[in-house]
Every structure is written in C-alpha cells, then in structure tokens.
Image (cartoon, grey):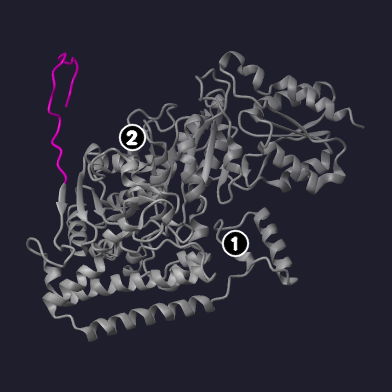
C-alpha cells in the first residue's frame, strides 16, 4: 500500500494490465521514452519495450483507427490522446467504427479498446487544452464513457475498461491528476463500470457529479453540513451507460438533486441525468433538479476559467435553492 | 537529408521520383512482356475470367433488384472487375481484406457469399457476418476511414510475428483524405505488412481524378511515406494480380501502394445519374478498354476458348446469381429486437429495457421492422 496520485494510479493500472495480459498494447504521442506528456506511461516503455508501448506519429485519427484494427484482431489497445481538444479527429473512428463494429458484424468482430483522454479545466492550460466534451461520446450507442474521480477509482476503473470487451472512452480529470493522494494496493482489482459511487452519505439532498467536480461537491457538502444540511454526494463515474438505478435510489431518499459538471450546460450529461430522474423518480422529487455547469459559451482562456468552472459556492447556492422548495 | 544550417540558395537532390507501370494484356488481348506463370496456365486464367464474369453478373442482378425495389442503394463495380479479382486472387486465405464499398469481386473471391452481399445492401447486418473469411472487414462506407484499420490489422500481424498481410482497397477520392495519408505515413515508419490498393476509376461521384489532386499520379503519394508506389493497368487482371503478389511477397519488410488505373463505366451508385456530369462519348471510349473482353480475347487466342465453354460459363454464372437472389429474397428480416443484440457483449440495463419495449410492441403486432 503506497500513497498514490491519480496519474500514478493510471500508470499502475496500465503496468498491471500489461504485465498480466500480453494482448494489451499502448499507443499514442510521446507515450514511449518520454512517458506521456502527463507521465501516465512513465517507465512502461522501459519495462515492456517499444513494440508494446508505441510512439505514434502526430495523427489522432490514426491512433484511434489503428486501435480499431488491432482490437478486431484480438489485441487490447489502450490509446492515449494528449488533450481532449485534440480528440476530434479520432471521433470519426470512435463513432463510425469502434462503437458499431460488433453490431454491424453481428458479433463476428468486436472492438475492445480504450481511448484515454486527459480532460477538463482548472490547470491554467493553453487554449484547446481545457474542454470537457464527454457528452459527445456519451451520446454514442456502443461506447462506454468512464471518468475516475480519485486514484483508487482511476486504478480500478481503468483495469475494468481494459478488460471490457467493448470500446471505452476513459476521460482523466487532469485537474486532480496530482492534487489528491490516496493509499493504493496494486492488487489488480477492477471496479464495476456500471455503477455510481456514494462518496458521502446524506439525507436532505443528492449532489451528482463526476471527475474533478467531486472535489468541489464534497467541499459544498461540508459547507452545507455546517448549515445543518445533510448532502449525499454521488460520483456517477460511468457516464455511458449512467447508473440510473443508483442515482434514483439516492434521489428517492433525499427528494432533491443537484447535478454538477464542468461541461457546457445545454445537452450536457447533466440533462440526461435530470431527465432520467424525472422519468423514474418524479413523485419523490420535492424540488426541480438543479444543474450547476460550465456556461454555454466557449471555454475561456485561463484568466477567466475560474468564473466558468462550477465551484463550491455555486454548488452550495444551488443546493440552497433546491432546499427552499418545501 | 537536409540539416541546418542551410546553405543559402543551394539545391539538393533529396530523392528520385519514378513510378513503375505494369501491364501485360492490351485492350485487344495482345501480350506485352513475359507473362507470369499463372497467366500461362489455362485453368488459372479460366478461374480469373469466371470470377470477373460472376462479379459482372452479380452487379447486374443487384442493380436490377434495386431498380425493382428489392435492394437498397448499390455500388456496381462495372468495368473494375479486374481490380477486385486481381487483388483478391493474389492474396493468401490468411491475409485480411479491408474493402471499400465497390469490392464485391474481391469479397466473392475470398468466400463472402452472394447472399451475404445482397443481405448487406438489402439492409440486413447478417450480410457482414461472413461465413467464409471471418477476419475480413465488412464493407467500409466513410471513405478512407478503413485505410487506418488495415494499418492496425497489419500491426497486429507484425506484433504477433505472423506471416500475414492486410490488403486495403479504396477509390481515387480516398487519396484526398487525411486518413489515407495518416495510414500510409505510419505504415511506412513501422514497415507494416500491408498493401494499399487504389481503385482509380477516375471518378469520385461527379468529381474527376484531375479535380481530386494536381499530383501527376496517385501512386507517387507513396513516396512521401517512404514506400514504393506502383501504377498498374487496372483493366489487366494479370498485371493487377502480379503487382499485388509481388507487393505481398515483400510485405514482411515493407508496405506498398498500388494505383490501379481503370474506369467506372457505371454510375457511382444506383442513387447516382452520371449523365448529369459526364458525357457518354467518354464512357464509350473506355468501354473499348474494359477488362472482361480483353481477357476473353486472350483466352480465345491463347487457349482456344470455345463458344460452348463461354456459354456454359455465362449460364452457370447467371444461375448462381439467380439462386443467390432467390435465397436472399426468401430470407425473413430479423426480429426487431435484433437491433440491440450485439451492441455490447452484455447489454447495459437501459438497453435491455429498450429492447424489452421493442419486443412488447412487436409482439402486439405493430410493424417496427419491414
């Protein structure tokens, strides 16, 4: 058991998967000798060699497209895209091919691949380095979309994603790559890809979020506790398919829900979660579902990004609005 | 290779630029150069001829089925049969074909059945669950996106140390797409066991080859990727097979780009009307160079191919096509719930709920499928 950051947990999971399954190969830009721009693959090239930890040319479509080809032939490629702003050339491959290979061949060919993408804002990164466009992937049938919120989640969920027989888009919240440390046992234990996690139990209100926003949500819950409000914090973790049962169970208990995400509001995953709550828990609701999200504008450059990203006060305010319905 | 500092104004010869061109059979069936052994073997030549005739008969039937409302949009390969058949006949059964949507000649050669092809174009996913070549890719629709898959398949073979190659077919339009360049670039660096074949039929729907690129040839695009680019007469099945065989023979150490020069004698698909953008006289000129007639002339002159043999072959091709069409038309659609069956290996709960909803509606007699 060692104290471990989220990015170190990613590396441990990759290392474990590669050591135990020779079908696992890594490919991406600078993932080899350099260990990746965030060092998520640090040391793997040295341990497993350049055949299995493969630096690609600067070609995002190729990283995804070659992974599709590898996956159909029995490999388990784990591809890295350096930043979410550069994932768009790869979307064609994920939407038109990875997500539908199994369906269109009636199961003859399948596409067990993982596309790892550091995502989200809050690290004062240059333009095109801070977006959260998880909803683009979560909209696509045939994909899974997973976002870890802690080192242990990153470790277990990534192992599960690599073992999954279908394509997984694994979005890593780079804002908390190094800000949280947790003791982690490198035991190869996966976490389920179809369940949300209760990070803090509560009875008055459910806050549903994922990734780096769990930090803000937990801080808001702490603040609310000081006001005598018991907030439950749910880490959705898997955004496609969302664990509606888990979220509904919480909302049936509390009657109130605030959904929080960094991505722009309209057509975000929060809208899907709010609609699912309406469908499944309408009679349990004591207040409208609140959404605290990024705004419907272009993600600002670093000087203004703190105004764009949801923070503890905004989440606490939304919770108070929800609680004002009696 | 140029290194800094640069010598101002100096020029440097950084490479030689030649494209090899292969052709054995002329339009009138006359022979150039020394034929490869297979082209001197009667049964081999008859096999190639039969495959081209069958492809043409299949295309004709598929278009007829579409015109009578019994098949969806279909892309005929009329005039390009030698590309499809030539490429597939060069491949080993362990190699993997990654085809575009106009390569039925290659697919049939590899053991994809006519019913499967008709099912696919008739709108049924079972058409891509090939009973024959289980590793071959289904037809690719988003142009050039599959060239990357071929690179991935080739990488898989290389990583496993298998003596197999990936063969990818695509059109001239595909060479304008980034995917094509990305795949070639990477195959060049990694020396992947892959052969990339351009079916240059001169048209990408209405856009002629000249409007696709200012490059003098498409084969030369290989040079920038550090691999060999070869031009071949795509109406000469011997030349296509020979060039692809040679490319496959060296694919363990280097990939190859092959540009097969042919002509799309038909419309782009059944949804297209080529008379809107090209003139019939031009197409008529290309009919004089089409691949089936020249092979028949060669067969007749070299191997005394008889009228009876010709008739028998045509007859059996038509019968096979008709029989396949009957079986296709007799096949019932899958139940509506089939649309969910292979989305994931295990359906997530919400998908299972939607599947049950569709099952309930279909059992109430509502027509969801047609």
In the figure, B274 relative to B184: above or below? Answer: below
The residue under label 1 is B339
Residue A52 visible in this rendered orientation of the protein: no
Residue at image position (48%, 61%) is A105
Q: Any mark on residue A57, and which?
A: 2
A207 in relation to A280, above or below: above
Check the image and name the residue furthest to the right. Answer: A326
Q: Residue at x 20, y 50 (%)?
A: B231
Image quarter (top left, top right, bottom left or bottom right) of the C terminus of chain A: top right
Q: Chain of mark 2?
A: A
**Highlighted magenta segment, given as a residue range:** B1-19
Height in image: B52 above or below A3? below
The residue sitting at 53% across, 39% down in the picture is A170
Say what secondary structure mark 1 lies in.
Answer: helix
Query: In the displayed structure, does residue A244 sit left or right of residue B150?
Result: right
Specify the label residue B182 is tagged with. none
Q: Are marks 1 and 2 in contact (CB under 8 Å)?
A: no
Q: Answer left or right for B97 relative to A198.
A: left
Q: Residue at x 47, y 67 (%)?
A: B127
Relative horizontal placement of residue A151, taking residue B78 as reference (left or right): right
Residue B17 lies in the magenta stretch:
yes
Residue A282 makes an appearance in the image: yes
Outermost residue to the bottom: B308
Quarter residue B280 falls in: bottom left
Above or below residue A136? Residue B172 is: below
Rendered location of residue A312, percent (x, y): 71, 21
**Relative image position of residue B327 (x, y in whole percent):** 48, 79
Seen in the image, is A294 located left or right of residue A302? right
């Amino acid at each position: 058991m060692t104290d471990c950051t989220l990015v170190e947990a990613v590396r441990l999971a990759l290392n474990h998967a590669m050591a135990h399954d020779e079908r696992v190969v890594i490919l991406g830009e600078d993932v080899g000798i350099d260990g990746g721009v965030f060092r998520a693959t640090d040391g793997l090239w040295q341990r497993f060699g350049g055949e299995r930890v493969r630096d690609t040319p600067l070609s995002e479509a190729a990283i995804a497209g070659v992974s599709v080809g590898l996956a159909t032939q029995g490999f388990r490629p784990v591809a890295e895209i350096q930043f979410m702003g550069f994932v768009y050339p790869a979307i064609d491959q994920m939407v038109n091919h990875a997500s539908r290979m199994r369906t269109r061949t009636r199961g003859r060919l399948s596409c067990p691949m993982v596309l790892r993408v550091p995502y989200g804002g809050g690290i004062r990164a240059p333009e095109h380095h801070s977006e959260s466009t998880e909803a683009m992937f979560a909209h696509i049938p045939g994909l899974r979309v997973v976002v870890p919120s802690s080192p242990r989640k990153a470790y277990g969920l990534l192992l599960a994603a690599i073992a999954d027989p279908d394509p997984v888009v694994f979005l890593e919240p780079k804002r908390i790559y190094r800000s949280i440390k947790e003791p982690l046992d490198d035991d190869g234990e996966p976490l389920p890809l179809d369940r949300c996690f209760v990070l803090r139990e509560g009875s008055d209100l459910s806050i549903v979020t994922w990734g780096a926003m769990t930090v803000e949500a937990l801080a808001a819950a702490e603040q609310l506790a000081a006001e005598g409000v018991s907030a439950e914090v749910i880490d959705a973790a898997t955004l496609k398919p969302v664990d509606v049962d888990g979220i509904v169970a919480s909302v049936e208990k509390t009657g109130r829900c605030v959904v929080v995400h960094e991505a722009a509001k309209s057509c975000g995953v929060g809208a899907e979660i709010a609609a699912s709550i309406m469908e499944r828990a309408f009679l349990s609701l004591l207040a409208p579902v609140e959404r605290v999200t990024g705004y419907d504008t272009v993600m600002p450059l670093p000087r203004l990004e703190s105004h764009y990203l949801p923070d503890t006060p905004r989440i606490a305010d939304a919770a108070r609005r929800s609680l004002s319905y009696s | 290779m140029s290194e800094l500092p640069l010598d101002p104004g100096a020029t440097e010869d950084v490479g030689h630029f030649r494209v090899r061109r292969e052709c054995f059979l002329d339009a009138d069936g006359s022979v150039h150069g020394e034929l490869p052994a297979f082209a001197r073997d009667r049964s081999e030549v008859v096999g190639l001829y039969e495959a081209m005739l069958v492809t043409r008969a299949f295309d004709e039937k598929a278009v007829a089925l579409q015109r009578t409302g019994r098949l969806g949009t279909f892309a005929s390969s009329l005039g390009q049969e030698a590309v499809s058949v030539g490429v597939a006949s060069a491949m080993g059964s362990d190699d993997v074909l990654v085809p575009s949507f106009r390569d039925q000649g290659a697919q049939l050669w590899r053991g994809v059945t006519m019913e499967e092809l008709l099912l696919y174009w008739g709108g049924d996913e079972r058409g891509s669950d090939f009973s024959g070549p289980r590793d071959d890719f289904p037809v690719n629709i988003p142009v050039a996106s599959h060239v990357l898959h071929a690179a991935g398949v080739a990488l898989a073979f290389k990583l496993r140390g298998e003596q197999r190659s990936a063969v990818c077919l695509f059109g001239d339009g595909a060479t304008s797409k980034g995917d094509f360049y990305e795949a070639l670039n990477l195959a060049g660096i990694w020396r992947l066991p892959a052969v990339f074949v351009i079916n240059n039929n001169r048209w990408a729907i209405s856009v002629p080859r000249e409007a696709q690129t200012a490059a003098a040839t498409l084969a030369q695009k290989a040079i920038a990727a550090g691999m060999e680019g070869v031009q071949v007469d795509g109406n000469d099945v011997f030349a296509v097979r020979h060039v692809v065989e040679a490319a496959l023979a060296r694919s363990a150490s280097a990939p190859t780009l092959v540009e097969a020069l042919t002509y799309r004698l038909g419309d782009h698909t059944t949804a297209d009307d080529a008379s809107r953008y090209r003139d019939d006289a031009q197409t008529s000129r290309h009919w004089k160079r089409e691949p089936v007639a020249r092979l028949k002339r060669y067969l007749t002159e070299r191997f005394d191919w008889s009228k009876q043999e010709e008739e028998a072959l045509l007859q059996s091709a038509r019968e096979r096509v008709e029989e396949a069409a009957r079986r296709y038309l007799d096949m019932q659609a899958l139940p509506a719930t089939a649309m969910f069956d292979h989305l994931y290996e295990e359906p997530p709960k919400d998908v299972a709920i939607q599947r049950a909803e569709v099952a309930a509606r279909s059992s109430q007699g509502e027509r969801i499928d047609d």
